[in-house]
């Protein structure tokens, strides 16, 4: 690569990171990333200024145009077949745009076969404004990973120094052409349009407005799926620097026939702009004609005048006899839906793309749409449409309904001005809050909670918003709070939304089910299973009663109820629900679909819990195969499966294969999203855990620290990912003997969990257990006992999470360390009973039996101790044989007991087995190796009491154990007793 290319790669990477940072962080981040390189800082600073000042192109572009025109012919000559651009080889030119040329390319590095649409800046079009816009487009695309958006594959610098990026190549037909050649019916057209809506709504959830939605930017694949293309003029919501109307028009980063009036005027662009673009597409898709006939190349004044005085006619009135959809089918609801989306005033359109899609779903299922005033006459009409057989008998009732409708209409007209004001408030709030997803977004998201707080206050202060609109806004804000992990704010808002919707619809409407489902998932996240279950089951029952068995909402509800059962530990009950969701996704989307791959992942997780690990691995691999086939081996989708499979192998103890897969996942995400993106950090954290198992302790610690730093910079401070990283870091600190560091990390984690999840959440209880365990190893018994008794006071035997059994077991150990054997036996027996009831014959039960044996030994009941150590050994050997795990855990405990009873001959085989296995494992088992050596030296000294060398070996082995923090707690009763006796 040329020196210029290397320089632009560096500039681009720094620009990406700084552009996404909050404004107040940018100067310090520039200092950090550029260091003493003043030239680099100046170049990035220029791009940032251009990015802020030229949302729709600035005057500097005029000077670039002359150079671009002069270079046009030369560029056409050079972009020839066979030319290399990064790892890609040019096949042919696909098209040209305002600032770039698009080429069909294929992989040329031999890694795998794949085609791509390669976008390069035109020669001469390399002003700071255009470079900033090009890098911004690449940055936006990296955030938009969705099945119906053409995804970003790669990015870099060409050999001549020009930035490029490679997009998914969609070998499809434009939407209108595909519908025409395939003779699609009305329902099929709407279904395709809904796929486009899903893509646009997802972009909005990433705070991105497309701004140029038109039929030619929508391709249909050979499989019949929609792909939205060309985010070349997309804009981040809230990004400063709106261009003037004249600048926008001069540079034409829009299509006149599909541009919204506010774009033509140069007003701020919002989600309503994309709603208008979708309305234009829907109009043409249904009526066969454009909504606005603007002619060829109108002037700005002509277009402004046209849109100021002209409103589109209803699609049913312009549909010709050969229109794709008969005019009769368009009259009524479809006319209303289209015209609402196309309203000249942005505040009178649908408040979100989701609201537009919801009305189309309602139309398809014969339900009343929201765009029409919800009066009794209209509801009666929908009743007639769905229940024609029984209408004659109800004629008198229908007359009364229409009489009521006249009065309702008069009331509505009396309040028209108030309704408009409420609508303006609604649009403002919905535009701020609709659909944010903090898992993927970068930089701007830490301020989202402040915006939500302000929006909630405004909504509460507004008394003139109708109940339907209020419920929609309450639900939207609650959903976003939940996505941010702020469940205590989310729950009361969704409770309000649910109450409003129950009052409006009698508890049977799909909107009510939506709120019940959302509130149930919030309660599930909070660990309140008793409140979550009836809500989630209500949503499932309602959706099953009103929708097809393979409707996406039904599939989602099946998965949510299954997740609840899984979290409660009822894996067997969750299994059939996961299988229903899996089968329904196959019918609805196909067995090779992205949705089916997602459901396979969910199913595999539960199979892991059921102990069906080979079946789980097969499901994970099937999901990986689907994603690699559909999206490519180096796609973001493939990275999801690589990570899931890698984590599964990590849990199986197959660390080398796990590390290899997780390294691939991290590399893919770093390339697509950037090294500082939260998704990259998620992969980093999973890799850290696998490295810890693979004897790479320092690398594991470094990865966990880096991931935590990224999460802290890029996510809201309440976000669960920060807590996950702190938790892993604390465990690594503990393993490395950094007790003070582990205590500090667990204390922070406990405060976070109590604040965001509550005192009784299973995660909070687990963290409390972990903190107590570390304090125990620091011999801070009183504090550890206090924490453990607090956990036990909050949990019951049917908790299903195991927090109570773990706390009982840890408390028994604390009591043993203080010589309180009788109390310890009581709690150890409780732990055994709880583990037996929860999971039956399991490794955890074997560990609990081992702890009971220890407690009984301390209490002086040697016979009971021997019985329970034997039971632990027998069960442990069985579990090890069936699950392929090491046996030394059980054999060391048994050997320790026997050596303490002076039965070294019986202990010898278990000591030998332990030493053989421990020779193969990593340094984290040093304490086990040291205990095995100590027991060996004790037996040798006992066999030859006159041997001074043997006695010295005991002293040396004991000293080695003393050097390991917490050794007296993590060893058997005999070894622990020697360590205590030797302590100062």
Image (cartoon, rainbow, N blue to C red):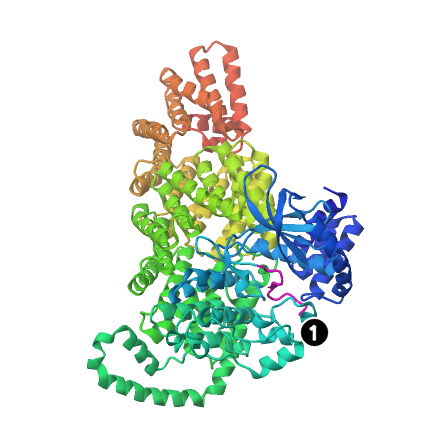
Q: Residue furthest front?
A: 322
Residue 437: in magenta span = no
Q: Quadrant of the C terminus?
A: top right
Asked if residue 115 lies left or right of residue 890, the reply is right
* Along the line of sight, the residue nearer the viewer: 867 or 659: 659
Q: Residue at x 40, y 55 (%)?
A: 527
* Along the line of sight, the residue nearer the viewer: 904 or 5: 5
Q: Quadrant of the N terminus?
A: top right
State the residue position of label 1.
246
Highlighted magenta segment, given as a residue range: 230-242
Q: Is residue 11 above or below residue 479?
A: above
* Along the line of sight, the residue nearer the viewer: 623 or 194: 194
Q: Is residue 795 above or below residue 259?
A: above
Residue 852 picture location, percent across and down: 35, 34
Q: Residue at x 78, y 48 (%)?
A: 37
Residue 955 picture location, percent across and down: 52, 20
Residue 480 visible in image: no
Residue 215 picture location, percent across and down: 52, 65
Q: In the rendered image, which quarter is residue 883 located in? A: top left
Q: Is residue 795 above or below residue 461?
A: above
Q: Is residue 773 above or below residue 561?
A: above
Residue 571 visible in image: yes
Magenta span: chief secondary structure: loop
């Amino acid at each position: 690569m040329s020196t210029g290319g290397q320089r632009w790669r560096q500039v681009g990477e720094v620009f990406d990171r700084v552009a996404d940072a909050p404004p107040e962080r940018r100067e310090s981040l520039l200092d950090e990333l550029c260091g003493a390189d003043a030239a680099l800082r100046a170049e990035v600073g220029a791009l940032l200024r251009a990015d802020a000042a030229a949302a729709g192109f600035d005057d500097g572009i005029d000077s670039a145009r002359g150079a671009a025109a002069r270079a046009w012919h030369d560029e056409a000559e050079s972009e020839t077949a066979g030319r290399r651009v990064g790892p890609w080889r040019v096949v042919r030119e696909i098209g040209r745009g305002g600032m770039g040329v698009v080429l069909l390319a294929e992989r040329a590095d031999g890694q795998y076969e794949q085609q791509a649409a390669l976008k390069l800046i035109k020669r001469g079009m390399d002003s700071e404004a255009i470079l900033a816009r090009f890098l911004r487009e690449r940055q936006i695309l990296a955030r938009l990973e969705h099945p119906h958006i053409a995804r970003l594959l790669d990015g870099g610098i060409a050999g001549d120094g020009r930035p490029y990026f490679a997009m998914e190549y969609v070998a499809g037909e434009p939407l209108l052409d595909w519908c025409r050649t395939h003779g699609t019916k009305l329902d099929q057209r709407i279904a395709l349009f809904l796929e486009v809506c899903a893509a646009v709504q997802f972009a909005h959830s990433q705070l991105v407005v497309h701004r140029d939605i038109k039929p030619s930017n929508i391709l249909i694949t050979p499989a019949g799926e929609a792909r939205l293309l060309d985010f070349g003029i997309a804009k981040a919501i809230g990004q400063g620097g709106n261009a003037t109307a004249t600048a926008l028009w001069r540079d034409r980063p829009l299509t006149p026939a599909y541009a919204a009036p506010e774009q033509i005027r140069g007003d701020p662009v919002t989600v309503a702009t994309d709603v208008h673009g979708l309305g234009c597409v829907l109009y043409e898709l249904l009526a066969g004609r454009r909504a606005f006939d603007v002619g060829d190349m109108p002037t700005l004044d002509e277009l402004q005048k046209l849109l100021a005085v002209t409103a589109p006619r209803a699609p049913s009135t312009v549909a010709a006899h050969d229109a794709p959809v008969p005019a009769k089918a368009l009259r009524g609801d479809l006319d209303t839906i289209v015209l609402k989306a196309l309203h000249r005033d942005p505040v009178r359109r649908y408040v979100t793309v989701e609201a537009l899609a919801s009305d189309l779903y309602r139309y398809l299922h014969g339900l009343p749409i929201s765009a029409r005033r919800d009066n009794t006459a209209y509801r009666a009409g929908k009743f007639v449409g769905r229940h024609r057989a029984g209408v004659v008998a109800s004629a008198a009732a229908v007359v009364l309904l229409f009489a009521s409708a006249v009065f309702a209409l008069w009331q509505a007209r009396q309040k028209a001005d108030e309704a408009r004001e409420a609508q303006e408030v609604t649009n403002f709030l919905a535009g701020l809050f609709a659909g944010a997803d903090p898992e993927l977004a970068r930089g701007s998201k830490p301020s989202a909670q402040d915006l939500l707080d302000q929006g909630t206050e405004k909504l509460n202060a507004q008394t003139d918003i109708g109940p339907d609109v209020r419920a929609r806004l309450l639900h939207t804000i609650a959903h976003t709070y939940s996505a941010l992990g702020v469940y205590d704010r989310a729950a009361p808002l969704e409770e309000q939304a649910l109450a409003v919707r129950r009052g409006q619809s009698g508890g049977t409407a799909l909107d009510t089910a939506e709120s019940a489902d959302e509130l149930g998932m919030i309660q599930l996240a909070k660990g309140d299973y008793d409140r979550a279950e009836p809500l989630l089951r209500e949503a499932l029952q309602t959706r099953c009663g009103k929708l097809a068995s393979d409707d996406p909402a039904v599939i989602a509800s099946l998965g949510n109820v299954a997740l609840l059962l899984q979290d409660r530990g009822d894996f067997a009950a969750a299994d059939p629900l996961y299988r229903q969701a899996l089968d329904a996704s196959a019918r609805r989307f196909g067995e090779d679909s992205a949705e089916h791959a997602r459901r396979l992942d969910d199913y595999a997780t539960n199979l892991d819990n059921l102990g069906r690990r080979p079946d789980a691995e097969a499901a994970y691999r099937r999901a990986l195969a689907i994603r690699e086939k559909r999206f490519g081996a180096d796609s973001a989708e493939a990275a999801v499966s690589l990570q899931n499979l890698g984590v599964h192998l990590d849990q199986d103890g197959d660390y080398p294969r796990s590390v290899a897969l997780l390294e691939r996942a991290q590399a893919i995400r770093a390339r697509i999203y950037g090294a500082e993106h939260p998704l990259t950090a998620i992969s980093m954290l999973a890799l850290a855990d696998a490295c810890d198992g693979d004897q790479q302790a320092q690398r594991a610690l470094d990865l966990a620290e880096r991931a935590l730093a990224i999460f802290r910079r890029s996510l809201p401070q309440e976000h669960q990912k920060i807590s996950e990283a702190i938790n892993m870091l604390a465990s690594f600190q503990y393993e490395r003997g950094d007790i003070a560091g582990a205590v500090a990390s667990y204390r922070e984690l406990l405060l976070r969990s109590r604040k965001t999840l509550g005192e009784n959440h299973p995660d909070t209880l687990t963290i409390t257990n972990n903190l107590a365990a570390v304090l125990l190893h620091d011999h801070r018994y009183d504090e550890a006992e206090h924490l453990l008794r607090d956990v036990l006071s909050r949990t019951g035997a049917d908790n299903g999470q195991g927090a109570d059994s773990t706390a009982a077991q840890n408390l028994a150990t604390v009591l043993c360390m203080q010589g309180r054997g009788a109390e310890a036996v009581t709690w150890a027996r409780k732990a055994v009973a709880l583990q037996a009831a929860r999971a039956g014959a399991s490794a955890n039960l074997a560990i609990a039996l081992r702890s009971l044996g220890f407690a009984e030994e301390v209490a002086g009941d040697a016979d009971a101790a021997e019985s329970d150590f034997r039971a632990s050994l027998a069960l442990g050997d069985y579990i090890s044989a069936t699950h392929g795990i090491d046996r030394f855990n059980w054999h060391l405990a048994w050997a320790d007991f026997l050596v303490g009873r002076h039965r070294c001959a019986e202990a010898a085989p278990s000591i030998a087995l332990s030493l053989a296995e421990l020779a193969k494992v990593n340094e984290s088992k040093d304490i086990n190796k040291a205990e095995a050596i100590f027991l060996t030296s004790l037996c040798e000294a006992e066999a030859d009491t006159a041997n001074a060398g043997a006695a010295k070996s005991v002293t040396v082995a004991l000293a080695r154990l003393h050097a390991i923090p917490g050794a007296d707690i993590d060893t058997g009763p005999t070894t622990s007793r020697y360590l205590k006796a030797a302590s100062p």
